Amino acid sequence: MTHDTAQKEIDWLYSTQLFGIKLGLDNAQRLLRELGLPAAGQKFIHVAGTNGKGSTCAFMHSILKQAGINAGLFTSPHLVHFGERIRDAERMISSDEISAGINRLRERVSGWNPHPTFFELTLALALEWFARRGNPWVILETGLGGRLDATNALWPAVSVITPIGWDHMDMLGDTLAKIAAEKAGIIKPGVPVITMTQEREALEVIQTTAVERGTPLTVLETAWSRETGLPGPHQRWNAAMAVAALKAAGFDFAENVIQCGLREVEWPARFQKIRPGVVIDGAHNLDAARVLVRTWREQFPQQRAQVVFGAVAGKDVSGVLREIASIVDGWHFTSFGSPRALPAEALCRVWQGLGLEPRPVAMHADVAEALHAAGGAQPVLIAGSLYLAGEAIALIEGQADAFERSAQ
């Protein structure tokens, strides 16, 4: 397949983002049925929650890799390029495989009404690749919510629900109980569920749903006791959930395999020290911002940051800014390459409207300009959105030409 043909197929997939996010299982179930997916005998661990989903998935995947099991991993969004969403222990899906898979899907769904969404097509592409790769296990992260998320069309061996907080309220509900009910929608009769102690309102919904569906529920009350490859005390909780989920799936790994997997994990943009004194974190909601501040104080005691900040529309920007403010010495507000990105001027207005202790503020036309201006003697923190994090990583690591903008 030529480069131009491959790019045309990928561009078509991105164009399906115009169909928006449509919660519901009908199209996903139809796609799986018509494609004969998933592969016979393939087993899944399904992960939902507000924060920590990706890290928990990464921990499980890393442990399985250490144990010599070539598991698939499906996550979103990507940071730099689309292939990051679909990988196994050996490699990511290649550009040619993406293009060929999209071509097959494009022909299959021609004329469908409603047309499959970007996320539904991406899931189908992933499951087809996992089938071809012969992955015995797949770690599957929900896209949005749980109950009506396309990934819920699959029947897992284990379900995991990470901490539930305030995010996507426009689609999931305006109370913690409503949001929790959507996340708990991944609970299946008889399928073990792993979660952790969290807000009472959310935990009660998970417990009630588990009882109603006759599901064995494990609520972890202690974090993993040792350091992991991802900094911050919250990551030890994610590690504990990962270990418990693998045990519930029937694995009985030696302690050194587990510890090595937790230590060797790689998961970018989660308090990632990408350069000395430069940290990238995808924190984009209130709970994630609180965790970010705690981790910053643990890693950089007595130091404040020059913060490069960007956010997408629909987020609790004022809440996140208020939370991060205590570790900020100067703001560098910027837009970035997502159609949902807020302009720097809008972010500045939100900050000024909070009436907090003044900080130096600069507004920048793009991420490259913001990064250049923020650099100096003080540590730099890049936060507010995973889309911003991805663009920053691409610029810092010299991958700007490979960066693929996405709205989802």
Image (cartoon, grey):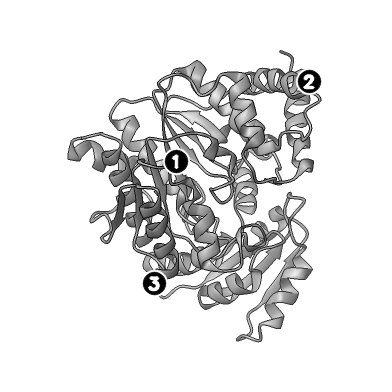
Q: Residues within 10 Å of mark 1 (few under 14, many from 20)?
A: many
Is any atom of residue 273 visible in this view?
no
Of pointers 2 and 1, the one earlier in the residue sequence: 2
Judge left or right: residue 44 versus residue 108.
left
Q: Which label was assigned to residue 46?
A: 1
- Residue shown at 59%/23% (left/top)? 33
> CA separation, marks 3 and 1?
37 Å
> CA separation, marks 2 and 1?
36 Å
Judge left or right: residue 259 versus residue 91.
left
Residue 314 lies in quadrant:
bottom right
Q: Which label was assigned to residue 4?
A: 2
Q: The N terminus is located in which quarter?
A: top right
Residue 347 lies in quadrant:
bottom right
Of pointers 3 and 1, the one earlier in the residue sequence: 1
Please determine whether, in this image, residue 308 is positioned above or below residue 239.
below
Of pointers 2 and 3, the one earlier in the residue sequence: 2
